[in-house]
Structure formats: C-alpha cells, structure tokens
Image (cartoon, rainbow, N blue to C red):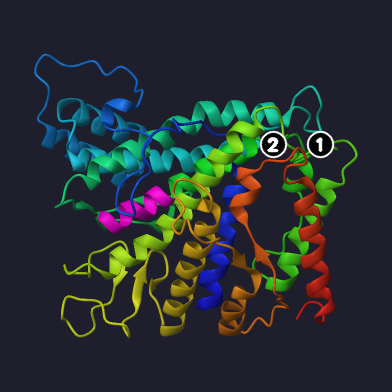
Amino acid sequence: MPNRLLTTILLTIVVCCAGLTVGCVYDDDQAAPSDLAPGPEADSARAVDRPFVPLADEPPPVAELIAQGKAALNERDAQTAHEKFLRAIVFDADNSDAACGLVLADGIIVLDALVALPGQLEDPAMPGKSGGIGENLQRVVQTSLLPPLYEMLAMIKITQNDPHFSFWLEHYPLIIDGDTWLFDLGKEWDAADMIAARGYTYMLLGLSDTLLSLEADFNWHTVFNWDYGFGGDIDQMIINICDLLIVLLTDEDYPNFLRLNQEGATLLPKAGIEWGRGLRDLGLCLDLARAESDFQGDDVFGYIDENGNHAWDVDERMHVPYFGDLTDAGTVTLSLFQYYSQGIGASFLDGTDEDIDPDNPNLWNLNELDMLSFHLGLGLPLFDLEIDFGQFFRDAQPDGLHTTLLLLADLIKEALEADGGVR
C-alpha cells in the first residue's frame, strides 16, 4: 500500500508537469492569505470573468438549480453542471453549495483539457518535429485552463466564508475510462477538501507561470513515445525519467529549452509563491481533516474514528480517495507526504512576503527523504544537500532551469546506478 500511494502521488505530479504549461498573473500588492484564508486572487465571485448567463423571466429557485447541477455532476456532465451552478451564483452570490459545485465542475473541465492537450501540440507545418510547441501550449492553456483555475480560487473562497459548509454529492466520477469510473469522489465535501482543491489549483498555476517564464519549445514526440517504466521497478522508472530529461535538454534542435524568456524575470517570482501556497495547502488539508469532529464515514477525505469519540487520535488511520481505508503503513506514508509538502513549500516561500520564518532561512535538505526511503524499503542513496527552492524563483537567472535540471538528472541517475543499479 505505501508503495502504491507514493507512486500515485509521483505520477500525479508527473502528469501535471507534462500537461500544463502557462499561467496568468495576479496583483502582487494584494494581501497574503493566512493558512486558513483563501488566496488573494479574487475577493468575491464577481472578481471572475464569466460568460453571459441569460436570465429567465421567472428563474427557477436556487435550490432547484443546485439539484440540477448535482445531477449533472453525477453523470460527469461538467458543462451542464457549470451552467446550473453559475446561474445559482448569479442569483445568490454567497451560496457555498453553488460555489462548490462550480469548483467540482471546473475540476472536470481542467482535467479534460489536460487529457486533450497532447493532441493539440503538434505543429502541422512541421510533422514529427513539434515545432512551435511553446506557442501551442500557451494558446491551449490560456484559453482552456486559466479561466476555470481562477474561477476555482474565487469559488473556494466563498465556501470558506460559510462556517457550516458541507456539500453532499452521490457521485463525482472525476476520472473515467469509457463507461468505467476509475476515480469517484462522491460523498461529503467540506473545508478540508476545499483546501486540498486550492492546493491543487495553486500548484497548477505555479507550474503554469514557471513554464510561461521559460522557453517551452521541445520535441513532444520524444516525450510522448518515451518508455517511462510506470508500474515497474521504481528505481528504473526514475532512471528512465532522468534519461528523458537529459535527451530533451541536450537536443541540438532545441538549445534554449527551459531557459528564461523575456517575461521570465517578472513571472518566475510569482510562480514560486504559487508553488509554495499549493504545497502548503496540501499539507494543511490533512491537519484540517484530522481536526474535524463530525461523522467521518461519509467524508471524501477523513480519519477512521475507530473508538467513536468524534476526534482523531494519533493511532487512527486515514481514509483517502481511491485507496479507501489506509493501512497503518499507508497512513505513515501520508504523514510523510504532509511533512515534505510543508517543508518544501516553506522553502518556496522563503524570502517572500509569505515567509513563515522571516528571521531564518527555510532550506530543505535532500537527506530528509531518508525517512521515506527507510519506510518504503527503497534504500535510495541520499546525501546532505541543502536546497533553497525560493532563491531560484526570487533571483531568476537567464539560464533558467536548463543547466540545473541537466545536472540534477545526471546526479540522480549516477547515484542510483552506483548503488547497485535497478533492484
């Protein structure tokens, strides 16, 4: 179970990194959010540009619109659900159920846009070379991803303004394969789940601004046809990904891949803050879930209240989407993931207005992974290396990520191979 959980977390990050590219900017002068506050991007539902919604002479009650939106989400009809929940927000701008419904509808829209992204990348004028892929990525993300992502942030804030927020959904088939539901997130959505959704949204925006800051032309066919080794030995999978990075970064046809572009000096610092917020939220949502005192049996994400005291106890396991009730080892893996999210997130926010400890550097040491390596029995070769993630984003250099990633890929590959190769 712990290996399965870690692999899914890693694959989620890999899928996001492969699929998303460019982002949008927000006002740097806005106040930084507290740990429990929503992000600063929008002060209300009205802050998001929305399509025109014609109003009927006698509009249906908000409750009826919400019920219709839920029914559409149950069938994974994101467009209909979005329309119904959006009409409900127009009539009642503070309705947390309508806001949550829009978050979930937008979540499907974002996921579907990511899934469709590879088919929109190739330049017809240069088949097989993926020329102009950077422009294609920017166009797709700006038109298909950024609007729902920023709407999600604004809607999440509305749910957090409701101290009694709770949204019940019979089914939420987020990921499907034909008629098969692979990932159904139906059940009760509450404040902890909204923080998780906010973390997911910030990380996608952070990745967007990161890649918008860099030269993004590369050979997509190399990425698409690469043998990643997913599902096999984890060491071999990491080596295969390192080999891919080395090939992409040394491709003579794309010498500037991941070097800073003209907008990078402005956008990259914003990206670092978004990455930090996202990682912070992914750690925070676990604390919020464990602090709940309501019935946990119908929660999307919560703890298993084995002694029935309506409080999380340190020896109680967690219930998470897809995996269901975690084992003790799986719960430890989840706690380690929270620990790393908070530590790396603090490094991203180091030196910014949201620095959690302004008087001291928040560096992250690579040997912190030793706990996870020991827990999973991986035996990864680790060493003492302090990493300041925030510095890279604060002090953007013309070389961007190009040389750093190339050196890191070489280092990780050599370390794994020197440790005895693939086990």
Which quadrant would residue 234 be assigned to in this image? bottom right
Q: How far apart are marks 2 and 1 (CA)?
A: 9 Å
Q: Which residue is pictured at 81% across the width and 46% down the height? A: 248
* Secondary structure mostly taken by the magenta-highlighted segment of the chain: helix
Q: Is residue 377 above or below residue 273?
A: below
User: How far from the left and from the top, in percent, is residue 10?
Assistant: 58, 62
Quick check: 293 left or right of 135? Answer: left
The kind of residue on which mark 2 rests is: Leu
Q: Which residue is pictured at 50% across the width and 47% down the height? A: 352
Q: Find the magenta span and give its range.
A: 191-199
Q: What element carries label 1?
A: loop
Instruction: Give whichever of discs 2 and 1 has the lower sequence position.
Output: 2
Seen from the viewer's position, the closer of residues 59 and 136 is 136
The residue identified by callout 1 is 256
Magenta highlight on residue 194: yes
The kind of residue on which mark 1 rests is: Asn
Q: Can residue 331 be seen at all in this image of the molecule? A: yes
Magenta highlight on residue 71: no
User: How far from the left and from the top, in percent, is residue 83?
Assistant: 29, 29
